[in-house]
Amino acid sequence: MSEDTMRAVTISEFGGAEVLTVEEVARPEPLPTEVLVRVHAAGINPVDWKTREGQGMAGLQTLPLILGWDVSGVVEKVGFGVTTLKVGDEVYGMPWFPRAAGGYAEYVTAPARQWARKPATLDHAHAAAVPLAALTAWQTVVDTAHVQAGQRVLITAAAGGVGHFAVQFARHLGAHVIATASAARHPWLKELGADEAIDYTTTRFEDVVKDVDVVIDLVGDAHDNTSTRSLKVLRPGGLLVAVPSGVSPDLTRAAEAADVRLTAYLVEPDGPALTAIAGLIDAGEVAVEVEETFPLEQVGTAQAHVQAGRTRGKVVLTVTD
Ligand SMILES: NC(=O)c1ccc[n+]([C@@H]2O[C@H](COP(=O)([O-])OP(=O)(O)OC[C@H]3O[C@@H](n4cnc5c(N)ncnc54)[C@H](OP(=O)(O)O)[C@@H]3O)[C@@H](O)[C@H]2O)c1
């Protein structure tokens, strides 16, 4: 590899795992206010395979494209004007979203303030598991729903990447947390702070839950009408945050009829929130679950693992030692 190139996973067309190609491409240069980060690990999120298939954020991208938004690495170069980071700093982030970040690569450039110091207690593989999932959990639970102590919060798909952070943030705020997951995950979710766990494979949550203040729905209406069913568990005036599939006209009408509030949501880069999250992780208040890591070359297998929809916590690509 020359000084000007890097290994990256590119796609030249949208499609199945076969469109993922590891190749040598030009190494990016930081513009003023940006830093160049040497990527040690890159987290995988459902939006990665959805975009690869031509859904997700595909409509916002141009081909060829380097997928991947979650990065943990080390600052290699700083652009003009950067005062908050220096060469050698260990950082993590979810830069540029929903524009392409190019995380499945050896180097990424992004605005300095979209990064934060990596949690000191985590290695890069665990740090790369945090940004997109934890920012989604933080921005929904804290910034959107303003969850308060004593409130009842239902989190669907609680065992996944976003869900396992949402459980911990809601619990940290003093909420009563109700989680849906398959039975094998219940003991772990209770350790993370869930007060109740419901096995969605045997029980419809609306049959056993009521008077909920906030639903963080991470399943969506595409699967078993989960967003629409979750309206039934909310108290009047309660809030549904519909994370995966947004808000359809039918869902809006159903929410009005049920006298509850409803919002769509899309994650945004947020360096200061990542700093706050790193503080909770380093204080031992929040744990990060990495189910499996794969080398960059096995990106197709790694994405297939996430696409199967049963991940406990996160899946991460290791890029550089
Ligand atoms: N709008 C946004 O900004 C935004 C941001 C992040 C994520 N998302 C979307 O939100 C969804 C969740 O993301 P993620 O990263 O957390 O996904 P993930 O890690 O792939 O979620 C996997 C988990 O989903 C659980 N699950 C699957 N079907 C379920 C069901 N019917 N009921 C309850 N749990 C179920 C599985 O639990 P079991 O193994 O126990 O079955 C597994 O632990 C995805 O659709 C993603 O694209 C949207």
Image (cartoon, rainbow, N blue to C red):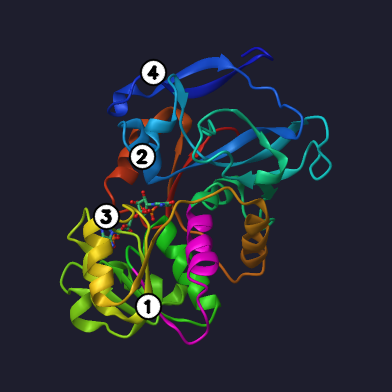
Q: Quadrant of the C terminus?
A: top right
Q: Which residue is mark 3?
A: 248
Percent position of residue 43, x then y: 49, 43
- Tell me whether circle 2 and circle 4 mark residues in contact (CB < 8 Å): no
Q: Is residue 259 magenta?
A: no
Judged by depth in the image, the label closer to the viewer, 4 or 1, is 1
Spatial CA distance of label 3 from label 1 is 18 Å
Q: Where does the image place residue 309, in percent across and percent down from the top left?
A: 28, 51
Q: Quadrant of ligand 1?
A: bottom left
The residue where tag 4 is placed is: 12
Real-space Cα separation, disc 4 to disc 1, in angstroms? 44 Å
Identify the residue at horizontal 28%, vertical 84% (top origin).
Answer: 210
Q: Residue, x 66% and y 32% (percent of image)?
A: 38
* Amino acid type indicated by mark 1: Gly
Query: In the image, 128: left or right of 216?
Result: right
Q: Which mark is residue 56?
A: 2
Q: Helix, strand or loop at disc 3? A: loop
> Dot 1: what SS?
strand
Find disc 1 in the rendering and name its residue.
238
Amino acid carrying label 2: it is Gly
Q: Earlier in the sequence, mark 2 or mark 4?
A: 4
Q: Residues within 10 Å of mark 4 (few under 14, many from 20)?
A: some
Identify the magenta region. Answer: 133-155
Q: Are marks 3 and 2 in contact (CB under 8 Å)?
A: no
Badge 1, how many Cα within 10 Å: few under 14, some, many 20+?
Answer: many
Q: CA distance from mark 3 to mark 4?
A: 32 Å
